[in-house]
Image: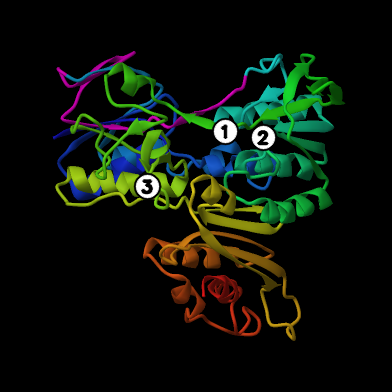
Amino acid sequence: MKIVVIGSGTAGSNFALFMRKLDKKAEITVIGKEPTMQYSPCALPHVISGTIEKPEDVIVFPNEFYEKQKINLMLNTEAKAIDRERKVVITDKGEVPYDKLVLAVGSKAFIPPIKGVENEGVFTLKSLDDVRRIKAYIAERKPKKAVVIGAGLIGLEGAEAFAKLGMEVLVVELMDRLMPTMLDKDTAKLVQAEMERHGVFFRFGVGVSEIIGSPVEAVKIGDEEVPADLVLVATGVRANTDLAKQAGLEVDRGIVVNEHLQTSDPDIYAIGDCAEVIDAVTGKRTLSQLGTSAVRMAKVAAEHIAGKDVSFRPVFNTAITELFGLEIGTFGITEERAKKEGIEVAVGKFKGSTKPEYYPGGKPITVKLIFRKSDRKLIGGQIVGGERVWGRIMTLSALAQKGATVEDVAYLETAYAPPISPTIDPITVAAEMAQRKLR
């Protein structure tokens, strides 16, 4: 069987490795625009800050590793078209035949139509080349004032990196808070306060209308000119759908797939940032542009091609980050979005400590849980705290994936040791608070 993968990023690289484990004889070819296989986009801000020394350090495996697995690599190669009738991929280096085709074409940075956005000193943060350009610019120009457009995960992590390098940082966000798709305003304020304590400041409800100077000298926010000598555009990403659209596949915001990750052509699969899957709370189509989702999609697609009866489950988009030592974890729906979707919810919120009150060194932690009134099920959560957010958000997400109710969370068996956690965990207290509202 000839299996061709278009895309050498997280989804495509992991698919090729999963597929090779399942089928030792299949002819697997990966076509990728970049010169390397998978690297970690989530690590890129940490390369800018210097926490990770070199851009090359975020490459997961060298190309030779894949070649040893008898995976054919066609890197520095662009897929131009898909001929579904002849079952070939047309590239700038010739045609590649397939029996099964996997689209792992990822996403691209969305660049809004801002005057001057193409000027020197304006960057996106999506690829290794982006990081190399930013680091070279910083080394040459030694910028003092950075403006970040967009307060999502990449924007905030980029802002943290610039602040750690000693720059004054301003984040400009059209919405009324940071991480607007992941946090409600009350939890977002906790993150904002911590970032401001470290010299990152915010302007909400406004946009940048112009970038002045090349190299950059200022940005225009409304009628005000704000000095800046570096600008990061972090206004989100868009799924790469052009190739699928040209091939006549069903496309919406992403490439539409079924539960097996097959497109409207059953011999073509789509995985990773480009694939449109199902939201676990609303049942609507959504994008799940997370590294963890890309790996899970890669595994499901490989197993399905290998003949297993597996499905990709609806997503809660569980995510976590750390900013200046503050951990932020989220999954599922926010309270605000639930209202927009017409979902009646009960919310439990608790602010406590990561350790018992009598034990030194405890750090503040705030847990917000969202339960659907109609069936009492957990459908969203947000945790902001000084430590051990990861384990709690993973636990809650796993419970939600299993259909847990407010009672399941309130009576959850947890672990206790004074140096690690309190006797009654903050997540169970938050659930109890929601439970009272549902009686």
Instruction: Report which residue position mark 1 lands on.
Output: 236
On the image, the x and y values in percent for residue 320 come to: 56, 54
Residue at image point 68% right, 18% down: 114
Q: Is residue 99 magenta?
A: yes
Look at the numbered discs 2 and 1 and tell me whether their residues touch, using CB distance below 8 Å: yes
Magenta region: which residues? 85-112
> Whole-Å distance between the Cαs marked 3 and 2?
28 Å
On the rendered structure, is 115 left or right of 334? Answer: right
Kind of residue indicated by mark 1: Gly
Instruction: Report which residue position mark 3 lands on.
Output: 283
On the rendered structure, is 220 left or right of 340? Answer: right
- Bin the neighbour count of mark 3 within 10 Å (Cα to Cα): few under 14, some 14-19, many 20 and up: few
Q: Secondary structure at mark 1?
A: loop
Kind of residue indicated by mark 2: Gly
Q: Secondary structure at mark 3?
A: loop
Marks 3 and 1, the one that precedes in the sequence: 1
Kind of residue indicated by mark 3: Gly
Q: Is residue 393 above or below residue 315?
A: below
Instruction: Report which residue position mark 2 lands on.
Output: 150
On the image, the x and y values in percent for residue 48 come to: 67, 38
Q: Quadrant of the N terminus?
A: top left
